[in-house]
Every structure is written in structure tokens, then in C-alpha cells.
Image (cartoon, grey):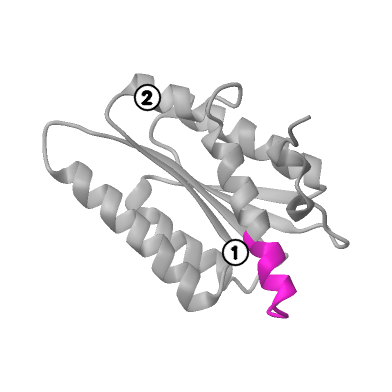
Amino acid sequence: MKQKKTDSPALRFKKPPHVLILEARFYDDVNDLMIEGVKAVLKKSGATHEVVTVPGALETPAALQFHAQRKKGKKFDAFVVLGCVIRGATTHYETVCNESARGVTDVALKLSLAVGNGILTVENKKQALERADAGRLDKGGGAAIAALAMLKLKRDCGLS
């Protein structure tokens, strides 16, 4: 019998992690599906979470850094970044895709963060919905699994 991704040892923690779900809310229906996938994975791992919304994918790197360094509230152990960028008629698509991914990666490396990047970059709404749906490709759940796996690795390295 094939083991489910959500049954992975990377999802089991002695001390349940506190996770930030950072969403670039532009396409409500796509985000709602992805958050459903993230929350299912976090619940199974026993993690607690908070959700913070930013206007678009380009704002995610700064918001990620703000919340990683915040002075108020409970500290986050891991981060799941969500959003959706659908190709349009201009080159703005490439800028948003490349710069949001680069920014999230830069912040994660600079601050040694456990991050799962779930910003979808797709050609059309049909592709976005297929990737967002927890019953199909579940990219939100996949981003949560990645964040938790990176947290486990970080802890195994004695960095958290």
C-alpha cells in the first residue's frame, strides 16, 4: 500500500509548530481551495496557524520578512506562501512570477526560514483551479508539506 504524503514522518512533531499562511489574495476561489489543502495538512500534523492576506504576489516577500521578524505575538516556526498568477496579455506575468519567487527565496535564505512556496504560476484559470483543488493536484497541501519538511530539517540541523 502506497504511503500518503500526509502520513510522512516530516509531519510529526514533539512540539506542534505554529505556521503562518501568507496569502496573496487575488483570485478568491483559487485561494479558498489552496487554503483548504494547507489547513488539512496542518491539522493532521497538529500545527496551529494564522492567516495573513496581502494584495498580490509581489507583496509576499516583504510580508514574509515582516512576520518572520515580528516583535508582537507568537513566533512562527514555518511559513506557507500562497497565491496565483495567471498569464495575461503583457509581460507583467513574468515580472510577478520571477520577482515573487526570487523575493520569497531571498527572505527564506537570509533569515533561515522553513518555507513552502505555493504561488501558482499558470496559463489560465482552469489550470489554477486544477492545481488549487485539494481533491486534485493540491498545491496548497503540497506547500504545507514542504514547509513542515523544511522545519523538520531545520530542527534536525539544530537551527530551531
Magenta region includes residue 79 = no
Query: Which residue is at the far right?
Result: 14
At mark 1, the secondary structure is loop
Query: Where is residue 42 drawn, in percent x and y?
Result: 72, 44
Identify which amino acid the numbered label 2 is placed on. Gln
Query: Which residue is at the far front?
Result: 1
Q: Quadrant of the C terminus?
A: bottom right
Question: What is the span of residues highlighted in magenta in the rendered image?
Answer: 150-159
Query: Is residue 10 in sight in this rendering?
Result: yes
Identify which amino acid the numbered label 1 is placed on. Ala
Q: Is disc 2 surrounded by few (<14), some (14 to 19) or many (20+) residues within 10 Å?
A: few
At 44% from the left edge and 23% from the top edge, which residue is drawn? 129
Query: Which residue is at the far left?
Result: 90
Magenta region includes residue 152 = yes
Q: Is residue 42 above or below residue 59?
A: above
* Left or right for 30, reference 48: left
Mark 1, residue position: 114
* Left or right for 81, reference 124: right
Task: Return the disc, 1 or 2, that comes first in the chain's sequence.
Answer: 1
Query: Where is residue 97 drawn, in percent x and y?
Result: 29, 48
Q: Main secondary structure of the magenta part?
A: helix
Q: Is residue 87 above or below residue 109?
A: above
Query: Where is residue 120 drawn, in percent x and y?
Result: 40, 39
Q: Is residue 156 above or below residue 22?
A: below
Q: CA distance from mark 1 to mark 2?
A: 27 Å
Mark 2, residue position: 127
At 32% from the left edge and 53% from the top edge, which residue is drawn? 58
The residue lying toward the viewer, choosing from 154 and 52, is 154
Query: Where is residue 132 drawn, in percent x and y?
Result: 50, 29
Give the number of marks.
Answer: 2
